Every structure is written in structure tokens, then in C-alpha cells.
Amino acid sequence: MAERGTIIEGKYEVLKLIGKGGMSKVYLAMDKNLNKQWAIKEIERKAYDKNNEVVVASAMAEANMMKKLDYPSLPRIVDIIEKENVIYVVMDYIEGETLSSVLSKEGAQPQEVVIEWAKELCRVLDYLHTQNPPIIYRDMKPANIMLQPNGNIKLIDFGIAREYKEQNLADTVSLGTKGYAAPEQFGGKGQTDARTDVYCLGVTLYHLLTGQNPCEPPYEIYPIRYWNPQLSSGLEAIIQKCTQLNPEDRYQSCAEMLYALDHYDEMDEGYRRKQKRKLNVFFATSGAAVLFLIIGCLCTGMRVHVNNSDYDNNIKQAELSATDEEKIDYYAKAIDILPGNSEAYFGIIEAFKDDAVFSLEEEELFKKKINSNLTVLQQNSDYGDLAFEIGKLYWYYYDYGKTENSDNQITRMKSAIQWFEAACTYGGEDSSYYTMAEMYRDIGQFNRDITLNVQEASDKGTYLPYWENITKLVATVSESQDENEIVNLEVYKLAMNAVETYARKFKADDVAQEDMKALLEQVKAGTEQVDTTTDKTEEMKNDILKRLQDAEAAVENAYAKDTEVKAS
């Protein structure tokens, strides 16, 4: 058993135990090289324990399976370390609490919230099911769903997931959680497939909506309105279909279930009655249609005029506001009035940056405004420009995962990649920001993928392009008079960290020692020239200048043997 302070494989320092069960424990650890927190699962090898064979085999299968996956709602496996008595699996550390914990504290959850969770779970399960071969999760339950501080969810614990085998008529091992597990999960009753996950998800939604644990009496899945008559009859029908004993009677895929969830209100009894009434009065109202059309055209013209006026007024009020909160509020109102106009989005981005922090609360507001309007915004000629500004907002200001003891630079980069990709796609090579967006995207992708590439020994040749992008970014920022102090200091810190961490790798990819020294000199000169206006940026500046010595030492160490040979 690892203890606090234990160093695993020379770089992972154990900070604390955060979970345990059966023959495995999970620790929070700090990567001393990358200054990043990871979760490390420790699985014991017990030589003569028959049951442990299943645990160890399951853990290795889980790790090797997850290494292939890349989806926002799934944790990544970045390292597998095999020792004589234990196996360590290093994965993303996910902050938050399980939905089982939320249920224990709060009871049944609001219907609208559960539906949004259900849709995301359908998407992630559909992603797994469309792998080649398909991956069947088999253990959906509230305890395996993490609710993060930003409101997003992640699916954890792939200990009993399996790749689907078409020739298998039945699973040989009964694995799953009784109460949530489908009938076919118990040996001899057929092979598990995508419909198994549909069943488990249906039971999970039942628990979340009603607060009734299926592992406790009455041990039956009652219609959800038995417990709460206010719940949707359409949603009740969906859950009833998910939890049919015969897989043939369920939704045949999570994509099919997702479609049903998107239209659950159309299955409500009230909705159907309303549609019937509409049909009955259709002919009675058709005679007045022409008159209403004329009036409607007049009203539409007036409404457009009023909307434009209200939109412009909110933009003006935002520009005149004294506080960031007021600016954000006015820009948000403007977006609600004309969601397809880009101006308010640019304005709210600048308001988010005013205090140098893009908080989780601000991100939640922003995502609500932009995600539902992306299709319209993408038709605008300036969408590439907007995507570029959103990318920079995440890259430099995103606050998620930052603590007093650790930076969140990698998290910020990863969150920005999709927006820089969109900037390249929609802006085109002729746009003024294309080259910068491409650099940001490639630097972000390198930092996202490098840990796994190192583990898989596929990192060779990736360091020179990374070096070239870093040097171009530093040169661009140094020459620009438009960037603020946060941007300048973040770029200089990124360059310094890159040299300190990858000096030997840069050398192996034929980067000259003189070039690395020159970059550090450029970082030093640029940092010294930054005029700081806040305590935060002053602290950043001092930290960079202080740590430059470590980066310089890393370069010297990387070329030490070459220097000795020349001297002799």
C-alpha cells in the first residue's frame, strides 16, 4: 500500500488516499515533472487468491481499453506501471462528487437536470458502442457518474466493461451491480450488448428521478409517476421501455434512446391532448388565416424594429457599465434578443477577461448562450474570428482546476483546442489570425497528447514541431504591441516550461543548444519589460524570472556530455 509522500516510478508523488474498494485503492498524486495532479489506482496482486484473478484481469483490460478512447465525458489513462506485488494505473483526476453522493444528500433530482444528464450519458455510451469492436460499459449507476464543479458529468470505473464479441452466445462471468444490472448480465442468460447499457441507464434515471434505490425494497421498477405524479408521462414511458426484461423490447441503441429523450415532451399525455385540440380547431381557424397573416406581417416588422432597438440599447448599456457584472448581464440580455449577432458575444468575452479570470460560473453562462446558437453563428462571416477569441479566453483565463499549489495551464490549453480548430476551419488561411490559431491548436494538441504518446513510445519526432511553434509564438508576442500583460507572461511561462521539461527531447530532435539559450534570453528580456499592474501579474513575472535558472540548468544538463567530449 502506498503512503503519503511515496514516489511512484520516480515522478508520481502520492498526496492522499481518495477511494478504496475490494482489492484496489485510488490515490491523488502529483506529477513532479508536469506539475499536474493525477488519480492513481493501485491494484494488489495476490498470488493464491482465486477471485483476485478477475480483479487484476479486469483492471488491465480496463486500462488497455481506455487508452484507446478520447471523449470529453471519459477519463483518460496516461500510464500503466506493473510492479511485482501491485499494478498502478495513472488516469485523469476528476474533481467533484458522485451522483450517488448527491442522491444521499439531496434525494430525487429535478427532472430537467436529469434529462440533460441522460442525454450526455446516451452520447458517451453511443461513443463506446460505435467503437470497433463495440465497448459495452455494463455498470451504469449513480456511483459511477461524477458531477464536476462546472456541472458537467463524467463516466468512471470501466472495471467490468467489455468488448462485444459477435460469436458469444452468453457471457461467462456475472458482473454488474444487482438492482441496476440487466437480466442478461447474469451468466447463461445471453450476451450483453448495447441494449444492456440501455437497461442500466434506464434504472439509473429511475433512481435519480424518484430517489428510490433499486437495490432496496420494493426491488421493482415502478412507473416513476407512482412516486411523483408531477413527473412527465413521456419520460415515464421512456424509462419503462428501457427497463424491459427482454432486450428486443428496449431501445435498440443509445442513439435511439437519445432521440426519444429529445422529444420526451411530445409523448406526454397533455401534449397529445393539446395536439388533438389543435387538429379539431384547425378548420375553424383557417378562415381567419389571411387576416392574421396580414396583421402578423405588420407585427413582425414592428417586432424586428423593437428587437433591434432593445439589442442596441443593451449593447450601449454594457459599454457604459462600471462593473464587470453589469457588463456581462447586459451583453447576456442582448444575446437573448438577437442570438445570431456576434457583437454581443465579442463584448461578453472582453467582460469575462476584465478581472483576468474566466470562472466556472461565467463559463456555464457562456456555454448556455453560445451552444444553443452555434449553428446560426457559424453562418456569420466573422465566426472564425469569434472562435479565435473564445480560444484565447480559455487558453489564458480559464479558472477550472487551478489551485494555490498548481497551475492549470494544460487544462486551459485542452479546453481551447476545439475553438482554435474552428478558427482555422471557418476563418481560412487568408484570415489575419489563421497562423496564430494554428500555432495555438498545435501547441495545445501536443500538450494534450504527449503523456500518452510517451507511454506508447510514439513521441519521437513530435518535439521539433512543438519547438518551432513555441519559438514562433514567443516571437509573435514579443513583436506585438497589442497583447496585454497576462498574455505576454503566459507565453513566456509556456516557453520556459517547455525548455525545462523537454530540453533533452529537443536536443534529440536536433534543436541546437544555442537556440535554446537564445529563447530563454528572449523570455528573460521580454518578461523584464512587462509592466505589471496587478499583484497576480507581478507574482507571475517574479516566478518566471526565478525559475529561469532551472530552465537554463536543464539545457546545460541536456548537453553536458557533448560539452565534456569537446573539452577533452
Image (tube, helix red, strand yellow):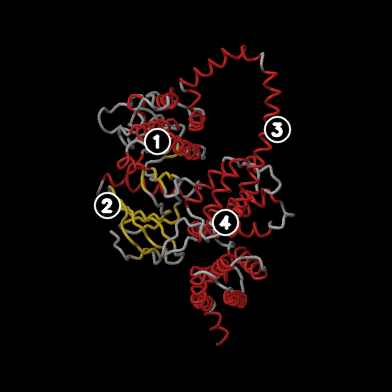
The CA span between labels 2 and 1 is: 48 Å
Q: Nearer the viewer, residue 240 or 38?
A: 240
**Quadrant of the rendering where the N terminus is positioned:** bottom left
Q: In front of the other: label 2 or label 4?
A: 4
Q: Which mark is residue 47?
A: 2
The CA span between labels 4 and 3 is: 37 Å
Where disc 2 sits, the SS reads loop
Q: Is residue 277 left or right of residue 66?
A: right
The CA span between labels 1 and 3 is: 39 Å
Q: Which residue is mark 1?
A: 110
- Residues at badges 3 and 2 in contact (C-beta under 8 Å)? no
- Which of the marked residues, 4 or 3, is nearer the chain's N terminus? 3
- Residues at badges 2 and 4 in contact (C-beta under 8 Å)? no
Q: Number of labelled discs? A: 4
Q: What amino acid is at disc 2?
A: Ala
Residue pictured at 63% horizontal, 54% vertical: 388
Q: In front of the other: label 4 or label 3?
A: 3
Farthest residue to the bottom: give it.
568
Q: What amino acid is at disc 1?
A: Pro
x and y, in percent, of residue 249 in the image: 43, 22
| Residue 115, above or below 269 | below
Residue pictured at 64% horizontal, 42% vertical: 340
Q: Which residue is mark 3?
A: 301
Q: Which residue is mark 4?
A: 393
Q: Quadrant of residue 223?
A: top left
The CA span between labels 3 and 2 is: 79 Å
- Which of the marked residues, 3 or 2, is nearer the chain's N terminus? 2
